[in-house]
Image (spheres, rainbow, N blue to C red):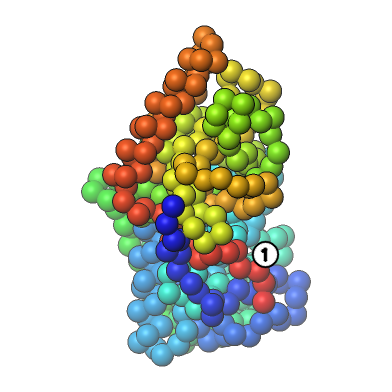
């Protein structure tokens, strides 16, 4: 157990906006330099965009903020599609709050926003609603109806309307282009090392502890049970994890999946914390995935399962020791609307 080193961001402003509102509910981010994007996972590529926004804001002596969109546009256009989110909106805001930005605008991605042409998005949202001093976007940022707005169009409109535009080129880790899709693929394969490298921090989930069937306690491994988003595409298996709880970090081992020995058809994340005693029911945990250990398996007996759980614990302790103090750079709690 050690103290959480999550970054405080007491002054981080969250503005939740929708075109149905005549004006933003909070004017604190008017005249800012905005980093534009979905920021799914707030990975290393996103950090380059955010750092460029911070640099431009310093040069212009303006605040810097992110503008992001919820729900994810893919979920809006195809609500029945499986969308594996790297972070929910609360997790995304917590990560953004650790970057040095002064705040985030969460635009409701609804029918009204989706219908805006690129020039209307710039005029109505960026200029009229937020009077931007500048915007920064990635090389692949497209916007407006039918994704017709391009970085070149954004740059030209910035020149015409009087705000700065910086377009950030693709960012790669060697031969591997950093993208949310590449990180999702790594997680679906259980490649925690690759996901961590691309993100720049260990991937994490947050959830409330719910009551389970107490199987772990009966076996000498009491677990905290968390139901993740049904769309979570993480490979089923056993992982070394580090858990944030009430401002402290605890090491542990976790199983994500159906538990072949006791399969009830329910997919659960079960977390066993080392060197912890206490009641976790109803608590919210941040669970960071540090290393892959093995796939789920069905054993010939409960004794064999318990022996494997002891071995999993040994492997997890070694992996966590090797990982040092690795943990996501999240502020201590989710940030609500102002």
Q: Residue at x 57, y 25 (%)?
A: 219
What is the quadrant of the C terminus in the image?
bottom right
Q: Is residue 3 visible?
A: yes
Position of 298 compared to 268: left or right? left
Q: Between 300 and 176, which is closer to the camera in this rendering?
A: 300
Q: Badge 1 local density, few (<14 within 10 Å), some, or many (20+)? A: many
Q: Is residue 292 visible?
A: no
Mark 1: which secondary structure? strand
Rendered view: 25 above or below 234: below
Rendered view: 258 above or below 32: above
Locate residue 17, reporting x and y percent.
Answer: 67, 72
Q: Residue at x 63, y 59 (%)?
A: 70
Name the residue beneath numbered marker 1: 108
Residue 48 occupies which quadrant of the picture? bottom left
Locate residue 54, reporting x and y percent.
Answer: 39, 77
Residue 62 occupies which quadrant of the picture? bottom left
């Amino acid at each position: 157990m050690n103290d959480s080193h999550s970054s405080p961001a007491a002054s981080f402003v969250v503005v939740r906006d929708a075109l149905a509102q005549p004006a933003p509910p909070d004017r604190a981010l008017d005249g800012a330099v905005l980093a534009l994007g979905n920021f799914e996972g707030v990975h290393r590529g996103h950090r380059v965009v955010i750092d460029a926004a911070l640099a431009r804001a310093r040069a212009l002596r303006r605040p810097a903020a992110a503008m992001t969109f919820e729900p994810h546009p893919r979920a809006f256009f195809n609500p029945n599609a499986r969308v594996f989110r790297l972070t929910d909106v609360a997790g995304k805001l917590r990560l953004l709050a650790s970057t040095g930005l002064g705040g985030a605008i969460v635009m409701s991605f609804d029918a009204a926003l989706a219908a805006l042409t690129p020039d209307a998005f710039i005029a109505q949202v960026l200029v009229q609603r937020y009077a931007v001093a500048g915007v920064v976007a990635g090389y692949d940022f497209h916007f407006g109806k039918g994704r017709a707005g391009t970085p070149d169009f954004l740059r030209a409109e910035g020149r015409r309307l009087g705000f700065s535009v910086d377009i950030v080129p693709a960012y790669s880790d060697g031969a591997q282009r950093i993208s949310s899709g590449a990180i999702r693929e790594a997680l679906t394969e259980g490649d925690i090392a690759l996901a961590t490298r691309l993100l720049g921090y260990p991937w994490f989930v947050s959830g409330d502890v719910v009551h389970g069937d107490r199987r772990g306690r009966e076996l000498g491994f009491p677990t905290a049970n968390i139901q993740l988003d049904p769309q979570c595409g993480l490979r089923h298996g056993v992982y070394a994890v580090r858990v944030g709880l009430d401002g402290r970090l605890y090491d542990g081992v976790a199983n994500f999946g159906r538990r072949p020995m006791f399969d009830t058809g329910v997919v659960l994340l079960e977390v066993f914390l080392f060197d912890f005693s206490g009641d976790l029911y109803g608590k919210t945990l941040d669970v960071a995935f540090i290393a892959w250990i093995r796939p789920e398996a069905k054993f010939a007996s409960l004794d064999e399962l318990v022996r494997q759980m002891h071995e999993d614990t040994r492997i997890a302790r070694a992996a966590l020791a090797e990982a040092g103090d690795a943990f996501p750079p999240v502020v201590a709690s989710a940030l609500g609307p102002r």
